Amino acid sequence: MNKRANDWQVTIEKLRRALAGPKPGWAVQKLMAPHPRPTLADFGPGHRPRQGSVLILLCPSSGDLVLPLTRRTETVEYHKGQISLPGGARENDEPLQWTALRETQEELGIDPYTVEVLGDLTPLYIPTSDYCVYPFVAFCPVHPTWHPDPVEVAEVLEMPLSLLRDPATVHHEVWETSGLMVNVPFYLAGRHKVWGATAMILNELVFIMDNLD
């Protein structure tokens, strides 16, 4: 094993331990949240959103660890054209971890048995689609070949972890949404803006990575 691969393994083991402990949750997620943004509490104690999962899949590439993001097609039901993590809706009573793995296989052609789930992040409510999303973090020791589903995925983007953790990657703009002026933080990934729930979930991962023992 070369030095770079050994460094990855050390990082992955530290991340696994960190994910097993307390997580920063909303205090960190909200730093990348559009403002104003509704929360689940705004809908009352009896509201029961649908459930879904997403997967942050770390894998080695060109001396770095990268994670796949997808640009959604214009034909999907929610978040058309946006940059997302692979994932989707829970089916029946399947474990939420399996939802993330199954959806990643359907969207990107990744065999669930070739990746190792390291742990989970804090669930996040998405008001636009009325889903509570459960994020999981996984590791694939060999860079996979992506086989995107053309119905759901218009493009696969590889986001280097080093770029995601660079503060210079974070930008802010004011957008008009549904007649409101909204302050939107986002990660700039090439020509793409990673914002909303995806950015909020990734920000929790960044915080944990920046504070590994």
Image (cartoon, rainbow, N blue to C red):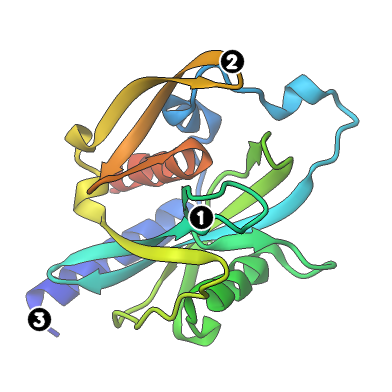
- Label 1 CA crowd tier, 10 Å (few <14, some 14–19, many 20+): few
Relative to 180, residue 62 above or below: below
State the CA–CA distance, disc 2 to disc 3: 54 Å
Circle 3 residue: 2
Identify the element where label 3 is drawn: loop
Residue 125 location, x and y as percent?
66, 38
Instruction: Look at the numbered disc 2 and give the secondary structure of its residue.
Output: loop
Q: Which of marks 2 and 3 is nearer the N terminus?
A: 3
In which quadrant of the rendered view does residue 186 lie? Answer: top left
Q: Is residue 157 left or right of residue 183?
A: left
189 lies above or below 157: above
Q: Disc 1 or 2, which lies upstream in sequence?
A: 1
Q: Which of marks 2 and 3 is in front?
A: 2
Q: In this view, does 183 lie above or below 208?
A: above
Q: Which mark is residue 31?
A: none
Residue matched to label 1: 20
Q: Which amino acid does label 1 sit on?
A: Ala
Compare residues 101 and 95 and report the one nearer the observer.
Answer: 101
Q: In this view, does 147 lie to the left or right of 177?
A: left
**Residue 8 at x, y percent in the picture:** 22, 68
Three-letter residue code for mark 3: Asn
Badge 2 crowding class, 10 Å Cα cut-off, few under 14, some 14 to 19, many 20 or more, is few
Q: Circle 2 is placed at which residue position? A: 179
Residue type at the position of mark 2: Gly
Above or below 44: residue 77: below
- Residue 95 as seen in the image, left or right of residue 83: right
Q: Residue at x 33, y 59 (%)?
A: 14
